[in-house]
Amino acid sequence: MINKIQDLLKRVEEFAPTTAAEVEEFRIKILGKKGELNALMEEFKTVPAEQKRELGQKINALKQAAQEKINSLKTTLADSAAQKVAAVGDMTRPGSATADGTRHPISIVKNQIVEIFSRLGYTVAEGPEIEDDWHVFSALNFPLSHPARDMQDTFFVEKASSEPDTKDVLLRTHTSSIQVRAMEHQKPPIRIICPGRVFRNEAISYRAHCIFHQVEGLYIDEGVSFADMKQSILYFAKELFGETATIRMRPSYFPFTEPSAEVDVSCNLCGGKGCNVCKGTGWLEIMGCGMVDPNVLEASGIDSKKYSGFAFGMGVERIAMLKYGVKDLRLYFENDVRFLHQFDSAL
Ligand code: DAH
């Protein structure tokens, strides 16, 4: 019997489980009702009286050792299970919220402009950024000597050396080129709004950049008048800058419109009283516009005796600067998230 006790004690000491289930199984096998320890107790009843003392002590020691080992295994295995859960994290916990990005202020304002005109029935038209002379200048009535055709103002795309350099391929300097493409392909009535990137050979400063964004508008139908243009632009100004906004038009010149005008909106910061943003005038310039020159209609195959129309064009960076009080245009291009996160919009 002493051998059995020693053997069991050895197994208890060497027992090295990895899971709590193994410990429980071992406990039942050793300490359970029908376990090995109880079997030894039964056998103990039959030992001669002179061995009882020694064997009794040994069995008690075995029982105690088995119990202690099982208890301590239970706690260490439970601890390591808890550690595993802690390492993985609580899988039922709600996910941590990720910070959503925000739309770029130029996109927000561009979308607002497009959305306002789409309420008046305008649809979006787009065109290529790399254009030809015809769509950017010639079809828009720019005389051959116009300074915009100069290298100083326009980026020309170099041809391969084998081809003659005709200065015909260029980066569009305005989105007015899109109206030419629309007039070539559509029949009146035409009512389009044309957002896009434009390129000019300008030194970069707080108020100018060589890449910026414009939105062009064009409406051609029978009997379209200057009054229609004025009312459409007034509606736009009130929608974008608020119900109290008013506009004024100053005579101006563009090769593709006649008559032409520059549109000012009442300064939304000082309400027209005069401040440093509107330079004391109470007015902010927001766009150019005019009645489409008959030469432009004819160049694109539209009968200028039957149809008339108006066009307008505005810089998105400029409108965004006025709307948000941004003082330096370069901020739009730096993509500093501290700047960008200030703009939030559903559009
Ligand atoms: N294309 C002009 C520019 O880049 C803006 C413009 C002015 C567009 C008057 C028009 C317009 O359609 O009628 O400065």
Image (cartoon, grey):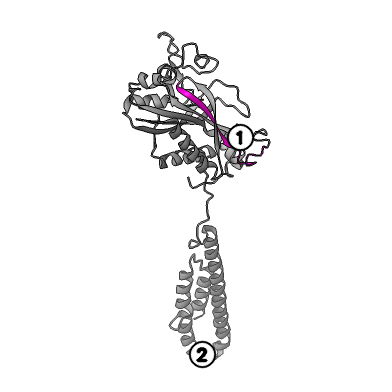
Residue bounds of the magenta highlight: 256-274
Is residue 14 visible to us here? yes
Residue at image point 57% right, 72% down: 72
Foreground residue, 126 or 121?
A: 121
Side (left or right) of 209 relative to 163: right
Question: Can I make out residue 335 in this image?
Answer: no
Residue 210, relative to residue 237: is it above or below? above
Q: Which residue is mark 2?
A: 48
Q: Quadrant of residue 118?
A: top left
For the residues labelled 2 and 1, the Cα–Cα distance comes to 118 Å
* Amino acid type for the residue under numbered disc 1: Trp
Q: Position of residue 139 (x, y in %)?
A: 40, 18
338 w.r.t. 291: above or below: below
The amino acid type of the residue labelled 2 equals Pro
User: Where residue 230 appears, x then y in whole percent?
Assistant: 48, 34
Q: How many marks?
A: 2
- Left or right of 127 in this view: 268: right
Is residue 273 rendered to the left or right of residue 132?
A: right
